[in-house]
Amino acid sequence: MSILEEKSYAFSIRIVKCSEYLQQEKKEFILSKQVLRSGTAIGALIAEGKYAQSKSDFINKLSIALKEANETKYWLSLLKDCSYLQEKLAISLLDDIENLIRMLASSIKTAKENNHEK
């Protein structure tokens, strides 16, 4: 398992637990489902990319994962700014998503560069 797969899987677990907290403790059901959907899609798309049919398909899967990561960052920021998430938890999750965004962007760039060499 690659470091990107490991980090995205660990992030998915954190997002599932965050969503459960939001629903059970804060009685927040709409935003919690949004962040759950986008936050877990990242790892799923990275896993799909592992068995991509081509380099272009791989790049496409990671590009969609990057879009989902950026959407997740939006939802986490909104949840923080609306006081649904404690500052410490929100900052920790936002740090994780920023790290995933950087890793995904770097992986996409490398894959595109390697794709053009052929």
Image: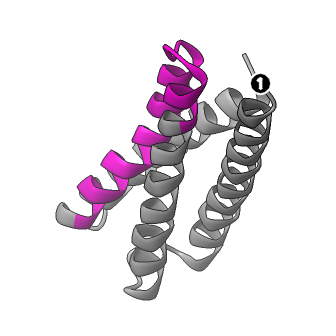
Number of numbered discs present?
Answer: 1
Left/right of residue 25 with respect to residue 8 in the rendered view: left
Determine which quarter of the picture holds residue 28: bottom left
Label 1 element class: loop
Q: Is residue 77 magenta?
A: no
Crowd around label 1: few <14 · some 14–19 · many ≥20 (10 Å): few
Q: Residue at x 71, y 31 (%)?
A: 115
Asked whether residue 28 is in view, the answer is no
Amino acid residing under circle 1:
Lys
- Picture coordinates of residue 29, whole percent (x, y): 18, 60
Against 117, residue 47 (above or below) is above
Q: Residue at x 68, y 62 (%)?
A: 98
The N terminus lies in which quarter of the figure? top right
Asked whether residue 1 is in view, the answer is yes
Highlighted range, magenta: 31-59
Name the residue nearer the viewer: 54 or 92. 54
Which residue carries the number 1 mark?
Answer: 118
- Picture coordinates of residue 91, whole percent (x, y): 65, 72
Left/right of residue 85 with respect to residue 28 in the rendered view: right
Name the residue nearer the viewer: 115 or 88. 115
Against 1, residue 12 (above or below) is below
Q: Is residue 56 magenta?
A: yes
Q: Residue at x 37, y 50 (%)?
A: 38
Q: Residue at x 44, y 53 (%)?
A: 68
Q: Main secondary structure of the magenta part?
A: helix
- Picture coordinates of residue 111, whole percent (x, y): 72, 35
